[in-house]
Image (tube, helix red, strand yellow):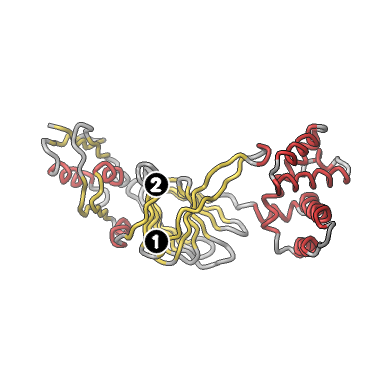
Amino acid sequence: MSQQSESLREAEREEGARLFLRARETGSDRDCRELEQWVAEDPERRMLLRDLDYIWDGVGSLENEPQVMQWRDDIESVSGSGRGRTYLALAASLLLAVAFGSVSLLMSHREAETAQLMATSIGERTEATLEDGSTILLDSASEVAVEYSRDVRQVRLLRGQAWFRVAHNPDRPFQVVADGEEIRALGTEFNVAVERAGPTVSLIKGRVLVSHLENREAFFGLRDRTVKLPVATLEAGQQLSYNSESQPRIRTFDPAAVSAWKKGRIIFEDLPLDKAIAIVNRYSRRSVELDPQLPPIRMTGVFNAGDGLAFARTAATYLPNARLTINEKSIVIQKD
């Protein structure tokens, strides 16, 4: 809690908390203007508003603390004609008590440990067991940031592809964030790959909830906040991917094809050539490049990961008037 907001008189803080709660609850122009006018009268009041806005987002994580449970019971027991004002007064007291008396408790709930980074170079794979028993198998040229807190187990897939086997713990959800999407799992095994249009999620066992993470301006523009917009709930055997317009698509998939990379292979099933090349280049230091003058085709086949030359030779046989130009850094499929 900032020193400026602590210097405000108790009655002034309570008034600010009541105005804040009313504006948050109703969202009406009148209530918002009233709060804005109150804040404009004293710079220290804006500091209080910042603190209340921060605490508001974290109160939910304290819902099982004894003191918070007692305050909540008091609020819910209010009835009769005076309920509106009494409700606001009690709710404001709760908010201020948390803000001024329980900041360390709140931070212990919200503060994540320092992110643990894991990365692989081209042609490398690695497996790690996390503190809760969950495992991550990281594909070639991939990177994750593991951020575990008291309440949430979060892994950010920064690039590439990873296979997750999640230890069951419904009280501490496991979620993977990849390219603006959140995959939330409970006792699940699944694969996530970061693709050009968006992540591809392939569910092997269990269930996952996929949500789109959208940044929105926070209350009174004090801080940005992230809103979760549900996209789909996947069952075992379903795969979610995105098309070029970033629209989600759900379909069944071949688990052997999705897991082939774990054995050093790549399996393509009627995949556009440019997308197949992007995947092949994840495993080879000598990149495969495609002449844009060549017509689009689709690839089907099984290839050894890292053997870009064999892939390029196969692709060239399906393209009219195509030849390969090979040097130390690239293999170019170009028009003859």
- The answer to whether residue 138 of the structure is visible from this angle is no
Tell me the distance, in whole angstroms, between the alpha carbons under discs 1 and 2: 19 Å
Disc 1 and disc 2 in contact, CB within 8 angstroms: no
Label 1, secondary structure: give it: strand
The quarter of the picture where residue 47 lies is top right
Q: Earlier in the sequence, mark 1 or mark 2?
A: 1
The quarter of the picture where residue 313 lies is top left
- Residue 203 has which mark? 1
Question: Is 44 or 151 nearer to us in this picture?
Answer: 44
Question: Is 328 or 291 nearer to us in this picture?
Answer: 291
Question: Is 332 or 63 nearer to us in this picture?
Answer: 63
| Residues packed near mark 2 inside 10 Å, few (<14), some (14 to 19) or many (20 plus) | few
Q: In x, y percent, where is residue 88?
A: 80, 52
Amino acid under label 1? Leu
- Residue at 11% x, 35% y is 321
The quarter of the picture where residue 38 lies is top right
